Image (cartoon, helix red, strand yellow):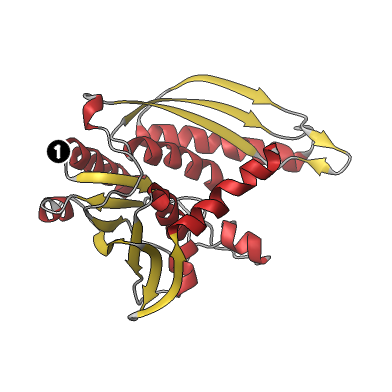
Amino acid sequence: YHGTMSAVEEVCRNLAAVGARIDSLADCLCFGNPRKPDIMGQFKASCEALRDAAIAVDVPYVSGNVSLYNETSDGAIPPTPVLMGVGLVEDIRNCTTSDMKKDGSIWLIGRTKEEMGASLYYRSMGKDCPNIPKTDFDSFMPRMEQLILAIEQGEVVACHDISTGGIATAVIEMCMSGVGANIRLGEDVRADVELFSESNGRWIVQVANDKEKDFARRFDYAIRIGEVGSKVSFSKNNEIIADFEVEKLRKKWTMPVWDRLA
């Protein structure tokens, strides 16, 4: 249920990150054998979440597909709701991109919570956590609309939603532009939680230098967390805990694709 709710919200976040308002959804539900009670339970929970999320966002599903009996002798595939969202923009010239620019401060919209369950970080570490990301559309919807308005008003020069891999991955992907970032972590949660939590309702935003006050007053929670730089660095309590050359990160990011294609 919560995974499907998160998937719908992520579609909305991705559209909002370029300045688009969600207009409609389409889904493809890929599951195992529905004759098995546990698989049918997964399918039912996912359908209920699709309903609840669409009602919260107030958009229709204009198309859908179901693929069942996806199993081998080793068992069923993970329950997989695949979502596509269509967004509308009033003027495509106002859309923003995710690549970090040379000028502009770096902000975080939305609170980071200790919701590490099913996160890429914990899965990579072989750890379990009962706290999985939840959705709160009551706070998310006005926050999303204010971000879109900020983009339309020229306050935002780059934006990236935070999802798989948390803040760390979002910032690094933005820095594939060749521009680095110096990020300061807060003091209220562990550094690894703040870096890799996949809590919903968040974006990394680069704000135009002369628009910071206008931008900040729009949101229930928006804090300045860094500035552009020559490297990608993360610090906590004035101590650098991770420091990377942009070109080395770019190589790590691109080489797996080349290795598979070679």
Q: Nearer the viewer, residue 253 or 158?
A: 253
- Residue 221, percent from left and from top: 25, 58
Residue at 22% x, 45% y: name it. 156
Quadrant in the picture for residue 117: bottom right
The image position of residue 203, as x and y in percent, is 35, 50
Asked if residue 82 can be seen in this view, the reply is yes
Looking at the figure, which quarter contains the C terminus? top right
- Residue 40: % across, % down: 71, 36
206 to the left or right of 81: left
Q: Identify the residue shown where x is 34% and y is 61%.
A: 181
SS label for mark 1: loop
Left or right of 244 on screen, residue 42: right
Which residue position holds label 1?
153
Q: Quadrant of the N terminus?
A: top right
Horizontal side, residue 58 vs residue 126: left or right:
left
Residue at 43% x, 53% y is: 170
